Each structure stands twice: as structure tokens, then as C-alpha cells.
Image (cartoon, rainbow, N blue to C red):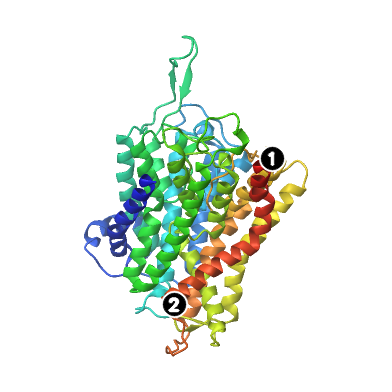
Amino acid sequence: MNDMMLTYALVIGMALPFGLYMAKSLGDQRSYLDRFFSPIEGVIYRLAGVNPEVSMPWQAYATAVLKLHVLLILLAWLTFMFQGRLPLNPDGIAGMRWDTALHTAISFATNTNQQHYSGQAELSHLSQTLAIVTLQFLTPATGMAVLVAIARTLLAKHRQESGLGVGNYYRDLTRSSVRILLPLAAVVALLLTWQGVPANYQAAHEITPLDAQVEETQRIPLGPVSAMVAIKQLGTNGGGWYGPNSSVPLENPTAISNVIETAAIMLIPVALLVAIAVMTGRHRLMVGIGGVMLAFSLVSTGLVVSSERMPNAAFAELSAPGGNMEGKEVRFGTDMSALWGSWTTQTSNGSVNAMHDSFNPLGGMVLIMDMLVNVTFGGVGVGLIGFLLYLMLAAFIGSLMVGRAPELFGHPLETREIRWISLAILAQPLIILGLSALAVSLPGVHGTTNPTHHGLAQVIYEYTSAFANNGSGFEGLDDATYWWNLTCAIALLIGRFLPMLVPLAVASWLATKRTAPAGRGTLALDSGAFMALTAGVIVIINLLGFLPALVLGPVAEALVLAQ
């Protein structure tokens, strides 16, 4: 327990100064950082042929986001399919099947990193570095960029460009990448290399295990692993170099590397609260949002830790007394495995240092709920965007409760805004439950390894992970099929772009409306009461939508095992 509390303290302690640095990096005001970074960024702008000084309307900003991602998906898709004919393939790995390549390209382009393949066995060094790592930088940078655009449009107390646009996507993207992700990832990669994570372009090594006959050998895949692991954690990406992810000793060799990788999951999402507070001047609002997120986080982590400290009921008479160690590394134990599992699903990270399919049923249910809520810090940029989406809905409900016309920061919330806010929120149960119902009703497509309650939980987890852009999974699922690749691709795309771009549009629409003066009945959006209302809206919406499915899955499984 002390290790977990120290990890929480480490993240918060680092997030405060780093958030101030991010505010300087992402803000519109000139700073001392420009002297160093502006020449580098200028070269990028000239090569890309863009003018970073042009402020875009929200439609142009959203179009730029979509156009870049379509291009990235196509390039990654082709790379995966034809990697067998491309260089940097010392192990001679063949190209991917078209549907697996498409799912992988979409998965990494949506900051999800859901893997229906085993990394070290099915991707070449070129695919891992050129396609995977590039997407792992650009997708979290896009989340930050869109958050900054929303913040300057809706949250800033003193807008300098009212009605002129939401900012320049290419400028926001470049600053997020060059000033934040690249330097931080370089530091973390060096720390991981220091701890023994591979950093090379060598072919797999043939070794003779100490406990085997002399003629028996084992292939140990290598590569620039530390660079990928650094950005996979910092960018809430999650896709591992190796199939079993950070439970593999080469990807996460020591207790120190485990703490580094665990803390990296939360660092940027927490630091963004500080950055947006400084950039917009809405300090109380960000403190309130951070308080709700921290409360959700502590409750989730406490429940998962408590669950995994309980013995595995399926092995009650076969294993030694103690916590549930099935699917966990002995060197991490139950607590640090549960902390990682909780944090990786609170954010859209999805990496693992233990197998979630082996968690006790109630622990697995909490992981699913973390992804359904998806705003407990959430992914880089998009976690706070998602919280603002719920905050908009809470403002609408709260205004009606006090008998006032709905408004947000003095701007009237009208039919158009509420229609799109509702669509962005209700898309989650429609997609997850709809696809889950199809998967379990069509014979021969669900691919579950357990025909009962846990099998249903595997299906719900997979689609929830896809829509939440998380990427983790109950790995007993046979997901490398046409059905899972193509249906998950649908959930990936809708779950990424609808909840991210709808708040951008709503922020722009609200910013063009006349601001009403505050009165006695005006909702104080930064008050404790309103934050409690927002937290209640988040919990109620997700419980109403998914409680029956959870009862039929992990809750029923827990009751059966308890008999």
C-alpha cells in the first residue's frame, strides 16, 4: 500500500512543475521556449507547407485532424501489409493479413493500440518504429491540440480572437510533439535503457536456456524497445513491443522500471489540468475537476486492489493462501499489478503488467467501469475533453433544476448543442451494447474461451476497450478474426473522433453567442456542489447504460464462483 501511495504522490509532485512547463509550451503568449523550439518548428512548417499563424474555424480544424489521420492510416496499413518486402526486417517477418493490418493501423491512429497480433512476432522493426511509434507520438499530440483549441475558445476568460477561429491545428500539433512529447519520451527512454530495456536494431538472439539440453535454443526478440515503451506509456498509447506487454522482463525488467512506467501513465493527463488552469485562468474549475478525477481514481484503485488481495476462487483448493497471483508477475505482486491495471483503464493507456483476464471477477468489472467512465484523468487531452462533455450536460440539467435557461459560462445552451452533446454521450452504449449483442447472438463469431458469464465479460470488455480507445483486453478472447478486426475498427473510429470533435464544435458555437451577465441564480460551475452534480451525472449515465450487462457478466461470475 505504501508503494501505491508513493506512486500517487510521485505523479502529483511531477505534474505540478511539468504542467507549468506545458502551459508555456502550448499557450499563445510568447515565452522563453520560443528561442529554442521556434527554429525547429519553422523547418517542420516549411516542409509541411502550412502557415501556423492562420486561425482556423472549427470545421477547418476538425477537417485537418481527419485528413491527417486518414493519411496516417493508409500509410500504416500499407506498411503492415508489405513489411515482408521492406527493409529493417532482420527476422524476415511476413506481411499482415489485410484486415489485421487495417485494424492495427486504425487502432494506433486512434490512440488505442488495441493489438490483435503479437508484437514481436508479427511486426518488423520498420513497422514498429516508422508506423507504430510515429502514430504513438501524433495521436496523443492531437488529443492535446484539440483540448487546447477548446480551452482557448470556451474556457479562456479573456479571448483574444473571439469569433475568428479556434486556433491552428498544425501549430498546436507541432508544439505538442516537439516541446512536450519528444523531450519527455527521450528522458524516459534513457531511464528505461538504464534499467535494461533493449535499445537496438539487432535481430532476435538465439540462446541456450540453462535448464534445457545443449541442442535446444530459444529466440529472444530485440529492437529499439525502450523508445517505444516510453511513448506508449507517456502518450496513453499502451501497445507493447512484446505480445504480453510490460509483464515481459525485457520490456519491464525491474521494480524501478515498473514505477517509471506506472507513473508515466498518469503524468501528462494530470499535468494537463495544471496547464489548462494556467492557460485559461480557471484555477478553481480545474481544481474541482481534478478533485472529482482523483476521487474516482482512489475509489477504483482501492476496489481493484481489494479484489486482487482476495484469493482466486477458481483455485481455492489448489493454490497457496494469499492474493490472486494468477496471471501476475511475482516480482510485482498483487498491489502494484492492481495499481497498474486500475491506472491503465482510468486513462486510455491499455498497457498491462499483468493479465486482466485473470483478475477476480469484481476486479475485472471495475476495470470495465473505468473504461466506461473514461474521464478519470482519461487519455492525453481527450480525458479532460470527455469530462467537459459531461460538464456541459450537467450544466444543462443543473440550469433546469434551478429554473433558469440552460447556459455554460454565460453562453446559452440550446437545442443544437444539447443534441450533439447527447449523441456523443449516448454513442457509447449504442455501439458497445449493440456490437456485443451481435457478437454473442451470431454463431461462430464471438471467439470466447468461456461459454458462460466470463465469456460475456470478454466480449463486453473488448468493445468497451475499443470505444474507450484503451486497447487492453481479456486476452482469452480469440480476436484475430475478420469479425473482431472489422467491428472493433468501427468502435475505434467512432469512440475516438465523435467525443473529441463534438465538444470542439460546441465550444465554437457557444463562443459566437452573446455572454449573459451572471445573476443570483447563475450556476457556479467551479463550486463543489456543481462538481458533485457532474460526478453524479457521470456515474448515473454509465450505470443506467451498462448495469444489466455487468450483472450478467462479471457480477454473475463472482456469484457463481462464491458458491
Label 1 to label 2: alpha-carbon separation: 46 Å
How far from the left and from the top, in percent, is residue 22?
31, 60
Name the residue beneath numbered marker 2. 525
Residue type, numbered disc 1: Gly
Dot 1: within a 10 Å radius of its alpha carbon, few (fewer than 14), some, or many (20 or more) residues? many
State the image quarter where residue 52 is shown.
bottom left
How far from the left and from the top, in percent, is residue 228?
41, 41
Task: State which quarter of the image contains the C terminus.
Answer: top right
**At 49% across and 43% down in the image, what residue appears?**
239
Name the residue beneath numbered marker 1. 447
First-in-chain label (1 vs 2): 1
**At 31% across and 60% down in the image, what residue appears?**
19
**At 63% across and 54% down in the image, what residue appears?**
490
How far from the left and from the top, in percent, is residue 517?
42, 90
376 left or right, relative to 104: left
Residue type, numbered disc 2: Leu
Q: Secondary structure at mark 1?
A: loop
How far from the left and from the top, in percent, is residue 541?
60, 66
Against 464, residue 256 (above or below) is above
Q: Secondary structure at mark 2?
A: loop
Dot 2: within a 10 Å radius of its alpha carbon, few (fewer than 14), some, or many (20 or more) residues? many
